[in-house]
Structure formats: C-alpha cells, structure tokens
Amino acid sequence: MHNLKIISSTIRPGRKGPLIANWIAEKAIKNGAFNVEVLDLGEINLPMMNEAQHPMLKKYEHQHTKDWSAKIDSADAFIFVTAEYDYNYPAPLRNAIEYLALEWAYKAAGIVSYGGISAGTRAANSLKSDLATMSVVPLTMGVNFSMFAQFINDKNEFVPNEISHKAAETMLTELIRWTKGLKIIKENK
C-alpha cells in the first residue's frame, strides 16, 4: 500500500476544510490502495518559515520542521484540500510547502478545491504551478466544489452529490497510477 497524506489548508476559526478533507480521506480509505493520514495545517500550526538554512540543505533547527519533514518525506502521494482565498490558495499552505524542498519530489498530488462560484479552481491552478516547481506531479483530474456550503447539512456533515463522488473516484484511480509510476523515478533519484 502507498502512503497518502491529505493536507487540509485552512486554519481560520469556523473553517470547513477539515470536513472536506475527512470526506476525501474516507473515499481514499475505501479505495484500499492507500495508508491514509490527514495533515491538518490548523492543528500542525507551522509558524511562518523560521529556518535559517535553505530547505534544499535539510539542515533543520526546529523540531516542528523536523516533524513536518518526516511526515512529508514518508508520503508516496498527496491530496491537497484547498479553499480559494482572494483568487489563490491559503498562505498557510504556501508556507507549509516552502518549509521543505527535497521531501516533496517525485510524488503525485490530487487537488480537492472549494469556494464560491469558481469552485476554488483558480486556487487549484495556482497550486498546481507551485507544486510543479517542487517536482510534484499535480494531476489534471481533481474534485472541485462550487458553492460548497450547499453540501454541509444541519449536523455540520459534508454530503456531496454523486458527481463529486465519481470525480473523487476518478482522481484516486489516477493518483494510484501516477504513484506507481513515480515510485520508479523516486527510487532512481
């Protein structure tokens, strides 16, 4: 089985990202190809980058960086769950990505985005571009939730429609395919 890290990007009070992250985690667990771990940036609470050395050197001073490095290094694949804030993905996610360098490389990433009318697609596109600079392979298949609050019921549960379930299954299938292929590249780096 492959190690999948699902990264929930939002940290502000009242955030809904963890609901969506838990939904996609359940889908990934049911898929059966992954060991799944949700990494909630709101709980991890990385400070703004405070390492003196460039991440390429992997000479980390702080325990929070060493812990983050170990989590990301142990991953075979990622799913980023991102909101769209001001036409982009949230700053805590960018900070979390930039903390590291080598740990991200040669791994595939799916993106689940959510927002208003744009469904977080502008954030997803920006994230894809930034992930590529870290040698992450962002999938073209993703899951996007337009007006996502409509999928949250009175019990604060995330209940998406059948189209979203099918999109998630397609993304997970592609993630498995790319993870298997990138394993060869990762082993030969």
Image (tube, rainbow, N blue to C red):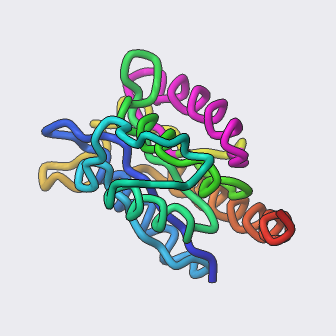
Across the whole image, how many numbered discs are drawn on residues?
A: 0
Residue drawn at x 36%, y 30% as measured from the top left: 147
Residue drawn at x 19%, y 36% as measured from the top left: 12
What residue span does the magenta drawing correspond to? 112-139
Residue drawn at x 44%, y 29% as measured from the top left: 89
- Residue 20 versus residue 145 in the image, above or below: below
Q: Quadrant of the C terminus?
A: bottom right
Magenta span includes 134 = yes
- Residue 174 versus residue 121 in the image, above or below: below
Q: Nearer the viewer, residue 83 or 42?
A: 42
x and y percent of residue 114 in the render?
42, 36
**The quadrant where residue 188 appears:** bottom right
Q: Nearer the viewer, residue 134 or 144?
A: 134
Horizontally, residue 36 falls left or right of residue 127, namely left
Horizontally, residue 94 falls left or right of residue 185, namely left
x and y percent of residue 128 in the render?
64, 35
Q: Nearer the viewer, residue 6 or 144?
A: 6
Q: Quadrant of the N terminus?
A: bottom right
x and y percent of residue 126 in the render?
58, 26
Residue drawn at x 45%, y 17% as measured from the top left: 87
- Residue 185 versus residue 155 in the image, above or below: below
Magenta span includes 46 = no
